[in-house]
Structures are given as structure tokens and as C-alpha cells.
Amino acid sequence: MKTIAFNSIKGGTGKSILSVLFINALVKSGFRCLAIDADASNNSLSFYYNESEHLESGSRKTVFNLFMGEKARNCVTGIKENLDLICGDVRLNEFRNTDSLKRLKRSLQEDTFYDFTVIDTSPTYDNITGNVLAASDILLIPIQQDIFSYQALKYQFEKLADLELENLDTHIVFNQFEKPLTDNQGAYRNQITNLFLEDETFKPFINPNCLSRSGVFRKYINKQNYRLNGRAETQKSYEEIKNLIHSILGIGITGAV
């Protein structure tokens, strides 16, 4: 099983949308996936909530129980074929100051039922995030072309260095990317983009595939039956997400996402 974490210190970079896209693409291609909502404040994977009749049950176990030491298989809610979800829980905030960074890793150990576990996180760095990163094989960091994303990424890499996760396969991905224009605004955007591209710390981790700015992703996250495929409206975004997944996981996605 491969565990993929989506995390960005800056909010609004699209990590939750990207996590949903990855999950759906993998499920559509026949892989068994476990989605974990580790955003203690926002229930970032609520995209899936109305696909199950059981999500409103107060007796269900959540990511809080997972951090308490419960095995993953005892906390899942079945969403559809090949997809289970461990729901978010505001009580997860209680673990922000926990001393252990291995709680989640221990709970996920020896679970071989799933091909992939995908974990979405809150836009912050704390011990919840540290637990997620320590349990993950792959980290995907979405960024946007602004100075705040650059500053947040600097901070995030300082924290990653503290964790000393040498085997964590890290990918920085430009999301909602816009090619520089010839006017002053475009020149500024180009300067900001180059801050990332020319930074020696980031260079080895910047994925060559980016996701272009498009209203398609907003439609996707707000309309349950909206799909990305080869039709004209979604073809570019569809090809970009397929290429991104292939570059990170080596998997060729088949069918609509």
C-alpha cells in the first residue's frame, strides 16, 4: 500500500480538490483506495458525504479514533466500490500538541487491503500534519503563483527538514497555473514563478506537470455527476491530471475521472 499526503501551509492552493481528483482517478482505474480526512476544522473530503447513507450516524468511528489507536479497518465508512472513507472529526484538534509523531503510522501499519491511502490535511503545520507525513510515502504540495505561497513553502520545507523523512517522495505542483503575459501583471507573475523555479531548495521537487487555471475544477467539486474526460470542455484538465498522476505514481489512468 502506498500512502499519499496532500498538504500545503497556505490555504486555497487546491489540495482538497487535488486529493479528490487523485482518489476518483485511482478508484475509476480499479484500485482500492482509503481516503482519510485529516482536516480537523473543515471536513475537507465532505465531497463524498452524500454518497453514503451512513455518514450522519453519530456512532461511526472517525479519524479521531484512528489517532486514538484504532485500526483503520475499524474506522472506515464504505462509500462505493473500491473506496472507503475515514471521516474528519473536530476532536482531532486534541492531537495538535501530542508528543508522538507515530500514532497514525502505527494505526495504518499492516493494512494491506488497500492499494492506496490518500490523506487530505488542513492548511497548517502541527503534530497532526507531522503524523500524516511520518505515515506517508508521497507528499504532494500544491502551490500558486503568489508570494504568500512562496513564503509558506519556505516554512514548510524548514519543518520537513526537522522531521528528517529521507524516504518521503515530495512533489511541488503548480495548481491553477497561468502562463505569464506580456503586460506588467504578466511580468510580475513571471517573477513570482521564477522565485520557485530558481530556488535551489525547491528545484529537485518541482513536478514538471502543472494544472492550468480553469473553472472546470470548481464545477467538478460542486457537482457530484460532473466528470473530466475527453470532451472539449474538460479535455485539457483531464489530460493534465492524468499526466500528473502518471508522473508521480507511474500509473496510466483509464476512463473518465
Image (cartoon, helix red, strand yellow):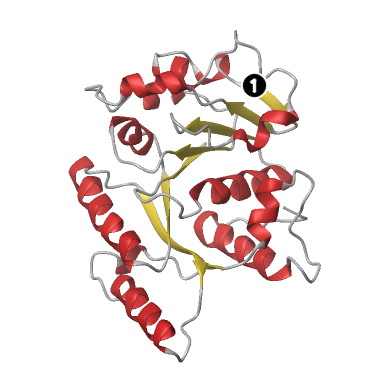
Q: Is residue 68 above or below residue 173?
A: above
Q: Is residue 198 visible?
A: yes
Residue visible at 35% across and 39% down in the picture: 133
Residue visible at 40% across and 14% down in the picture: 69
Return the x and y of residue 223 as percentages of the image width and height. Answer: 74, 47
Indicate the quadrant where residue 203 lies.
bottom left
In this view of the protein, which residue sits in the foreground, 217 or 31? 217
Q: In the displayed structure, does residue 212 sit left or right of residue 91?
A: right
Q: Is residue 127 above or below residue 145?
A: above
Residue visible at 24% across and 64% down in the picture: 201
Give the residue type that dot 1 points to. Thr
Within-10-Å neighbours for mark 1: few <14, some 14–19, many 20+: many
Indicate the quadrant where residue 20 lies.
top right
Q: Which element is circle 1 on?
A: strand
Q: Residue furthest top?
A: 59
Return the x and y of residue 170 as percentages of the image width and height. Answer: 37, 54
Indicate the quadrant where residue 230 lies.
bottom right
What residue would you read off at disc 1? 77
Q: In the displayed structure, does residue 249 sit left or right of residue 194?
A: right
Return the x and y of residue 129 as percentages of the image width and height. Answer: 34, 36
Return the x and y of residue 214 as percentages of the image width and height. Answer: 62, 66
Q: Is residue 252 visible?
A: no
Q: Is residue 30 above or below residue 237?
A: above
Q: In the displayed structure, does residue 74 sit left or right of residue 256?
A: left
Tally of numbered discs: 1
